Image (cartoon, rainbow, N blue to C red):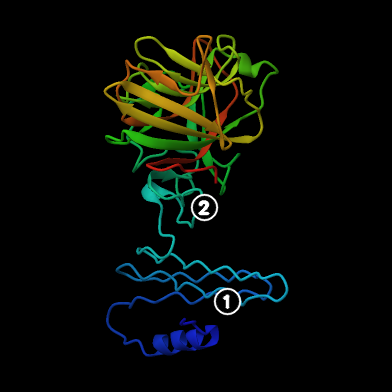
């Protein structure tokens, strides 16, 4: 079996770099290999980023650490750096999420949308792909990128008091019929009875960007959910409200992952909280999923806290929002 020698490989990289020809344009440079991991299972260093005016190549993947003695651990391979204007190993995530490996918030396979809000302007409403322009004329609500709380990085999206759908931000998901939505949600602490509000949503999925109903709503429901707690509600025709009984907790980040399947028979949805699949009580009937035959499909993801049938004062933050064709997970 062919095995690479870390020392010879490093010499080869230096020699190859020295022999590159110059031209009027800045040539692409390869990122350097990361340092080898230490014995006994040390991890390898990260490769540096390549750069190029026309999209440089990604950093060279570093060799793994030498095998340790005793307990047989091997060093993990270093990840290649992402090239400037050109994807290296890990590459950029769709629609503005941070470039990452499998452990990054935007590193899961099959993503069609991901935003960690790190590249967005603080204090402003998210704009540009994938978020569409708003048609909102209200000035009394909160919706902006903010650095007060963040699940990863330094920023998230904060909202409060949004009065109608056109004041939320929305992204067009196209014609997906079997997909997942993951969002990390943080409820700022409020009054002792803050989770007694009628219905408050953290994110929604709708067939038309500017309408409230029909919709898939994920958030919490207080006095009309039995048992009270986090809800998965599919409206349209007869409202199908899946009550989980899981009590929201203020002041901590919680991972919601929604699985949506749509077709001629309607929409079926399921919800996981912090990686645990939930069961529901819907109008007193135990269910493993929530289904509404009257809603056939959804096309838009909407962000921005909504409170139906009453006001809700505390701020709600969302971060590391992702949509994909495979399970995403809580990273």
Q: Nearer the viewer, residue 70 or 269?
A: 70
Say whether residue 99 is left or right of residue 65.
Answer: left
Q: Residues within 10 Å of mark 2 (few under 14, many from 20)?
A: some
What number of labels is visible?
2
Quarter-of-image position of residue 291:
top left
* Residue at the extreme front: 1
Q: Residues within 10 Å of mark 1 (few under 14, many from 20)?
A: some
> Residue 324, can we see it?
yes
Secondary element under disc 2, as helix, strand or loop, is loop
Q: CA distance from mark 2 to mark 1?
A: 21 Å
Residue at the disc numbered 1: 35
Q: Residue at x 47, y 68 (%)?
A: 80
> Residue 137, can we see it?
no
Height in image: 305 above or below 102? above
Q: Residue at x 31, y 33 (%)?
A: 177
* Residue at the extreme right: 70
Height in image: 304 above or below 81? above
Height in image: 80 above or below 132? below
Quarter-of-image position of residue 264:
top left
Lower sequence index among marks 2 and 1: 1
Q: Position of residue 239 (x, y in %)?
A: 41, 12
Secondary element under disc 1, as helix, strand or loop, is loop
Q: Position of residue 11 (x, y in %)?
A: 49, 89
Say whether residue 194 is left or right of residue 198.
Answer: right
Q: Position of residue 282 (x, y in %)?
A: 50, 14
Q: Is label 2 in contact with label 1 (beta carbons under 8 Å)? A: no
Q: Nearer the viewer, residue 68 or 305?
A: 68
Q: Position of residue 95 (x, y in %)?
A: 37, 47
* Residue 227 - label: none
Residue at the disc numbered 2: 104
Q: Residue at x 54, y 42 (%)?
A: 330
């Amino acid at each position: 079996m062919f095995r690479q020698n870390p020392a010879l490989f490093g010499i080869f990289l230096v020699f190859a770099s020295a022999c590159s020809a110059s031209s009027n344009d800045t040539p692409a440079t390869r990122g350097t290999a990361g340092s080898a991991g230490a014995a006994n299972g040390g991890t390898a260093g990260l490769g540096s980023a390549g750069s190029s005016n026309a999209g440089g190549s990604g950093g060279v993947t570093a060799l793994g650490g030498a095998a340790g003695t005793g307990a047989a651990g091997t060093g993990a391979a270093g990840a290649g750096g992402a090239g400037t204007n050109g994807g290296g190993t890990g590459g950029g995530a769709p629609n503005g999420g941070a470039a990452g490996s499998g452990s990054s918030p935007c590193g899961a396979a099959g993503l069609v949308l991901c935003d960690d809000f790190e590249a967005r302007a603080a204090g402003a409403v998210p704009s540009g792909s994938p978020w569409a322009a708003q048609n909102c004329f209200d000035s009394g609500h909160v919706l902006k990128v903010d650095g007060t709380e963040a699940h990863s990085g330094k920023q998230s999206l904060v909202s409060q008091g949004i009065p109608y759908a056109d004041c939320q931000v929305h992204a067009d998901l196209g014609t997906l019929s079997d997909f997942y939505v993951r969002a990390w949600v943080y409820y700022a602490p409020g009054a002792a009875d803050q989770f007694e509000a009628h219905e408050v949503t953290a994110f929604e999925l709708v067939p038309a960007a500017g309408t409230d109903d029909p919709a898939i709503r994920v958030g919490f429901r207080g006095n009309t959910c039995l048992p009270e707690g986090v809800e998965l509600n599919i409206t349209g025709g007869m409202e199908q409200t899946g009550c989980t009984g899981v009590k929201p907790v203020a002041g901590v980040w919680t991972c919601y992952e929604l699985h949506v399947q749509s077709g001629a028979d309607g929409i079926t949805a399921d919800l996981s909280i912090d990686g645990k699949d939930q069961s529901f009580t819907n109008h007193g009937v135990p269910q493993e999923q929530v289904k509404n035959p009257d809603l056939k499909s959804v096309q838009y993801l909407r962000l921005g806290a909504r409170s139906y049938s009453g006001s809700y004062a505390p701020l709600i933050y969302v971060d590391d929002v992702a949509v994909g064709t495979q399970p995403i997970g809580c990273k």
